[in-house]
Image (cartoon, helix red, strand yellow):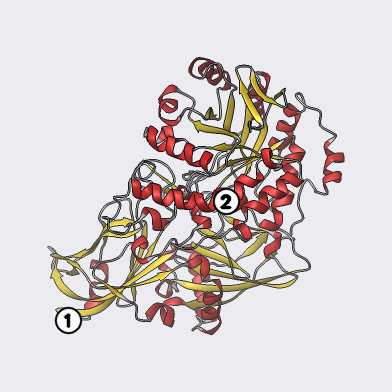
Amino acid sequence: MPSTLIPTPDGLLRDGAPHLIVSGAVHYFRIHPEQWRDRLRRLVAMGCDTVETYVAWNLHQPAPGTTTFEGIADLGRFLDIAAEEGLDAIVRPGPYICAEWENGGFPGWVTGAPSGRAAGSLRLRTRDPEYLAHVDAWFDALIPVIAPRQATRGGNVVMVQVENEYGSYGDDLAYLEHLRDGLRARGIEELLVTSDGPARMWLTGGTVDGALATVNFGSRAAEVLEMAAEELPEQPQMCMEFWNGWFDHWGEQHHTRPAADAAAELATMLEAGMSVNFYMAHGGTNFGLTAGANQDGPLEPTTTSYDYDAPIAEDGTLTEKFHAFREVIARFRELPPLAEQLEQLGIAAEPAHLAPAEVPIRSVVAVRETERFTRPAPVCIAPPTFEEIGLERGLLRLSREIEMVRTTGADGAPGVAPLRLHGLHDRAWVFVDGIPAGIADDRVDPAVVDLVPLAERILRGEPYRTVRVDVLVENLGRSNFGPHLGDRKGIVGGIWQGVRFHDDWEADPWPLEEMGAELAAIAAGGPALSADALAADAAATATADAATTATADALPVLVSASFTADAPADTFLDVSAAGHGVAYVNGFCVGRYWGIGPQQALYVPAPLVREGENEVLLLELERVPARLALSETPIWSTPGAD
């Protein structure tokens, strides 16, 4: 059966008539399922006829032998809702998706240490037989969700992508052919496409016969059209990713792009008959710890918010960019007046929000004083990686006793040899004899934890003393693009002090996304810090660095708070007075926060809010917050850069 969309030298045809695609990227895995229909209706209101989504493999297969298509992973339901709202669908199943998503969508258990092979030896995105075996098994589960929803079978899927931006990674043509043939063999009949950067150097690696080549870019559309006429002649032209905004890394300033500038590029494309897919139309949220990272030197982890400065904001608000794009689209197709269409669709330009309010902090519990931190754990020969221990995301506690030996500096002062963390991926908090010894990261390898300032507290006047050392290792997000794709997390090279590595570490995984209820129970029953200590901490934080505050020795802590709501509505949890950690609302892990910005408030969608009292819990690693609050809007601020 022929595909619904037929490529010709003059453009796409549908039922024999010219067809121009105006699509928007909306990722089901970045939106609460109860809000899928709302966001898709907003896409319709902008003038789009198609929705595009990636498929995040690691969401659906979080562990070996586990496959889920339920809840936020219910891809079929998302596509069905899109069909009900009159939208065609473009599905990009990967297996690699980039998307600023953790590990580019690959499960950590796939990219870690495959059975019978050395760690990291799996050749991702190639014809490596073991890698293809993983991909084929995944597609055997996934494609039966997509195939029956194709337009040729009465559904709405009109296009399926082969791999993703492969020309930015490799040139294994046999691999692309395997994916292409596998899609066809599993029943994909609709138009196959590839997507790559807008120049020959990308297209020569990422295209394959039997799939229409599309390009990704955000500016200089006229130049791209000239390139496409030369490199991709005699075919329809499509921008698969029109980067109309951009994502944020922690520590950067928030990215924005003028609406008029982006709208002008859109007009250039549509006037030339180029189909377009807005990336993103609605960015959404990297709930939990699902945000990815880039790496060109030290890791650059992506924020929890994936707002992307998109035309439909993280909370669904219709932005200036939405209106500018709609005005351009209306030149090429008839659209009803916006107010009339919004009323017909049953949506408001700005969703309802809870009123701004303080969120009173009820208690602060020192985690290291609880059984969760001190309990025995299995002993590993060397510090295991996250992948070796079966931990996708979260924290890994490493513990053992080490004999600390007094040294003497050139000035005669006592010292202790530093701890050197080789191959630290990504961040670690080190405690020696219960004393916070420092925070290490990947900017220098090995990461060095200087113990000289603590020598007297550690040794207590003795020439040597055996003490407990605890290391909390954090995965800030696996790389989603480039040569570091598939890198392992943890302390992959080992922990060295003095003249040798230290082996035999207890290893206790903390899968934080799954620990909301457990941490809430610990917070309810654990030893709370005194009100006097918290008051002193608040006073110190106002005038000094967090490391000097009264509660520094108690970190990490669990911070319990609550707010009331008359009815469920969207809100933003203002964590601008906090340090670094993970937040939960009613047991759901809404995401990571970090005072370095630019994101200073976490989006809490209405379906997570309940009428009456709502529980807020922070696992705070660096600074006890002086306050928490609710905000009606996002808060963007990068200290030292604003």
Q: Amino acid at mark 1?
A: Glu
Task: Say which mark, if any, is on residue 462.
Answer: 1
Eyeballing the image, is 579 above or below 208?
below
Place of residue 276 in the rendered image (x, y in percent of width and height, measured from the top left): 63, 30
Place of residue 353 in the rendered image (x, y in percent of width and height, measured from the top left): 74, 57
C-alpha gap between disc 1 and disc 2: 50 Å
Mark 1 secondary-structure assignment: loop
Task: Say which mark, if any, is on residue 305.
Answer: 2
Residue at image location 75% in from the left, 40% down from the top: 44
Instruction: Work out whether residue 299 can be spotted.
Output: no
Instruction: Work out whether residue 153 can be spotted.
Output: yes
Mark 2 secondary-structure assignment: loop
Q: Is residue 22 left or right of residue 366?
A: right
Place of residue 517 in the rendered image (x, y in percent of width and height, measured from the top left): 56, 75
Q: Pick whichever, 202 or 415, lies toward us.
A: 202
Place of residue 114 in the rendered image (x, y in percent of width and height, measured from the top left): 33, 57
Task: Say which mark, if any, is on residue 6.
Answer: none
**Quarter occupied by residue 386:** bottom left
Crowd rating for badge 1 (residues with CA inside 10 Å; few <14, some 14–19, many 20+): few
| Chain-order first, disc 1 or disc 2 | 2
Eyeballing the image, is 368 above or below 268?
below
Q: Amino acid at mark 2?
A: Ser
Nearest-to-viewer mark from 1 and 2 = 2
- Quadrant in which the N terminus is drawn: top right
Residue at image location 51% in from the left, 19% down from the top: 232
Residue situated furthest front in the rendering: 1
Crowd rating for badge 2 (residues with CA inside 10 Å; few <14, some 14–19, many 20+): many
